[in-house]
Amino acid sequence: MKRRFGYVWFVQLRPFLRRVLARILRLLPISSRDGGVPKGIIWDAAEWIRETERRNPPAAGGSGNWQVKVRDGELVTLPSPRSIESPIPRVFDSYQRVNFPELSVTCIRQGRVATSEGTVISPDDRVFDQFAHQWGDPVWNNKVFHLPGLGRLESREGQWATLIVPASGVNVGHWLMDGILRLSVLESAGIAGDVKIIVPDTQPKYTQPVEALGYGPERYGGFREGHWEVEQLLVPSYLAPPGFIRPWGGRWIRERLGVEDKSPGGRRLWISRNRARYRRLQNEDEILALLAREGFEKVELERLTFREQVEILSQANAVAGPHGAGMTNLLFAPHGTRVLELFPPKFVNPVFYSMANSQNQEYYYLTGYSLPEDRNPEGAKDLDHFRVDPAKIVQSLDLMKLPT
């Protein structure tokens, strides 16, 4: 019993001890290449490049760092979400008018990528703020500043482009939305060529989308919780702030996969989440029986290859399902597709509202309710299971006016 108590105490205290050790290491003259912690932040990559070139001008060989602009920033306005419910949750407000950033590709000679978050570190041991996808948190909260060492450093020759983003190694939806779409920036810059791609892992769910876009196994490498130093590290911009979908990026991947000009088909799809660990719809069978009378068919996307997922969604004229990574495949549904997304009562996340409207699809939503037994035992309310009133589904379908 004492040994068990001691183990639990150690596990709970271990993150605190790591942070304390990391703070000590940050003060020591030990590079993060050799087990230390990064020593600072680069707030502006373009300014850092100008400064490194000034210290090492082209006449002396140059530093080999550069940045090329690909696309201007743009303002996009989306229509309001539709629902039988009123009022519309205020969380949708910030998604209806979005300033998307300027896009570029940056080359960092002897740049490094570290941890599953894909943090980019300069040769002078500083973290690039604009390449740190922090979900709105300050860059000082980045994982690399709180670890006593980044693991064994591996070297990679040639040009490698990083697509790694936080959560891309555990959530396929984020890999597709935030990671894969960065290939559009690299290709639009005209420098994809023989560049190799850094992907989260070599599992099929990560490599199949890359291969479908023409990047075979010889063109990518699995990163996992790595620490790489690359001869020429290419960093394409994030297309959008976390949780937003840029229409330009959606068009790019649809064109590359041959589904951009497809008209709505005859299939009505229910994207099931019954195999998920969190946010399952507890009365799915009841809801699905109701939807089946309207021609909906159940699909479990995790059982399909990436190409099969693209093909099925490209044949849809209506898609419904609980909020979750499977809804990322709305990227491949035709323009004009009706979309009904179901939310748990305490987790209304408009990311797929952004995605659907960016592809000119008609977006509708409905929130459910949770019973005490639906609570997530880990305590996070945004992961609770939930239920939906069948009568509200019927009302929502009436509002959607599904195509015949």
Image (spheres, grey):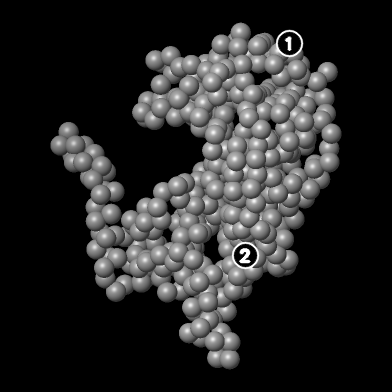
Above or below: residue 253 compared with residue 344: below
Residue 271, x across and y down, in percent: 65, 27
Mark 2 or mark 1, which has the lower sequence index? 2
Q: Residue 142 is drawn in which quadrant?
A: bottom left
Apparent side of residue 14 relative to residue 156 in the rendered image (left or right): left
Q: Toward the viewer: 289 or 138?
A: 138
Residue 132, percent from left and from top: 48, 56
* Mark 1 element type: loop
Q: Is residue 240 visible?
A: yes
Report the residue at 50% width, 29% height from top. 90
Please tell me which residue is depicted at 54% across the width and 87% down the height of the picture: 57
Q: Residue at x 63, y 28 (%)?
A: 81
Query: Considering the image in quadrants, where does the N terminus appear?
Result: top left
Left or right: 75 in relation to 254: left
Q: Which residue is mark 1?
A: 293
Asked if residue 195 is positioned above or below residue 143 in the image, the reply reads: below
Q: Nearer the viewer, residue 190 or 45?
A: 45
- Give, as a three-letter code, the residue at label 1: Arg
State which mark lies toward you, 2 or 1: 2
Q: Residues within 10 Å of mark 1 (few under 14, many from 20)?
A: few
Residue 89 position in % (x across, y down) = 52, 26
**In the rendered image of this protein, does residue 34 appear above or below residue 346?**
below
Tell me if residue 200 comes above or below residue 25 in the rendering: above
Classify the position of the C terminus by image quarter.
Answer: top right
Residue tagged 2: 105
Give the image quarter of residue 185: bottom right
Describe the element under mark 2 as helix, strand or loop: strand
